[in-house]
Amino acid sequence: MAAGLSLTRPPTCLACLRRLAQPFAHSNAGAGVVPLVQTRAKSKRLRPRDRGVVVRLLEDIPKYGRKDSIFRVERGRMRNDWFPEKKAEYMTASRFRELGLTRDDIGERDASFGIVADVEVENTPQSAAPTTASLTTSPEKAHTILTTLIPETLIFRRKPIPAPAPAPKAPSVSPLVAPASADTAHDPTGPVAIFGSVSAADIVGYIKGALVEDADGSRIALGPENIRFLGLADDADRLKALGRWEVEISTGAPGLEPVRKTVEILPLSGDSGEGDAQAAR
């Protein structure tokens, strides 16, 4: 009865059609008829998507971003091109801590960076292509922008290096002399060393990050060679201790003194109230 009802309408399922044709395929197997066999391809739907690796650019790369930009990029591009040519570095957890950054500082690729749109100049038949000078801010204007838009104090956070334990007291020293000698040997007011450092390149990255939204400020030609630490050796290019330091930013503007700012290095901790108070000043 059920079999009779099943034949009252033709099957619409592909599996049912193949099951009905299976006996005929077996009966004609000797005649060289190949039975119907379903072949399924390996599904890629459940394979997790590779989001790439987090990198930090060590130089400006057109269609990707400026130097010190942090974003995700394809693993093959980083492994085969950028890393061997030292155009970018991998941002590991330890590298984030050395730079005083967090995962929240990961940005997006700037696909429009370095692309100059063609500008049609009317009534100038001898107009030339835009030069490098026309794509950068003049030294005089850069001096004004750095003076007004950059805060007086540039704050960086680094992890301090713990001070070594005091040496054990010698048994031959008198108990009355030991406390005095211990106080003179350990100077709590001395500079506290830090893991990593704050280099001239870090200061340039700080300034460019602060001016990225400004049309003229983002075109300032500034490099580590424009940063000079006051009170240190002339060839010093980094700070390695907590404290406040003065720096000069040279723009090459004739007749104008370099822009002077203060760099403050604070200990890296969970409480950022002190750094916020310094930034407010």
Image (cartoon, helix red, strand yellow):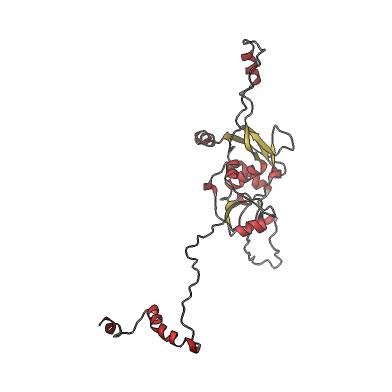
Q: Position of residue 121 (x, y in %)?
A: 64, 65
Which residue appears at 63% of the width and 20% of the height? 168
The correct choice, above or below, for 226 with respect to 184 in the image is below
**Residue drawn where x is 57% and y is 34% of the image:** 266
* Image height of 67 relative to 175, above or below: below
Q: Which of the two residues, 146 or 144, is positioned nearer the viewer here?
A: 146
Q: Position of residue 19 (x, y in %)?
A: 39, 80
Q: Position of residue 11 (x, y in %)?
A: 34, 82
Residue 198: give x, y in percent of width and height: 64, 39
207 or 255: nearer the eye? 207
The answer, for residue 63, to whether it is visible in the render is no
Q: Image quadrant for the C terminus?
A: top right
Q: Is residue 9 above or below residue 258?
A: below
Residue 151 relative to residue 140: left or right: left
Instruction: Report the residue that reaches farthest toward the right.
Output: 234
Q: Residue furthest bottom?
A: 31
Which of the 4 image quadrants contains residue 117? Answer: bottom right
Q: Residue at x 60, y 41 (%)?
A: 98
The residue depicted at 61 percent of the width and 47 percent of the height is 208
Q: Is residue 171 left or right of residue 101?
A: right
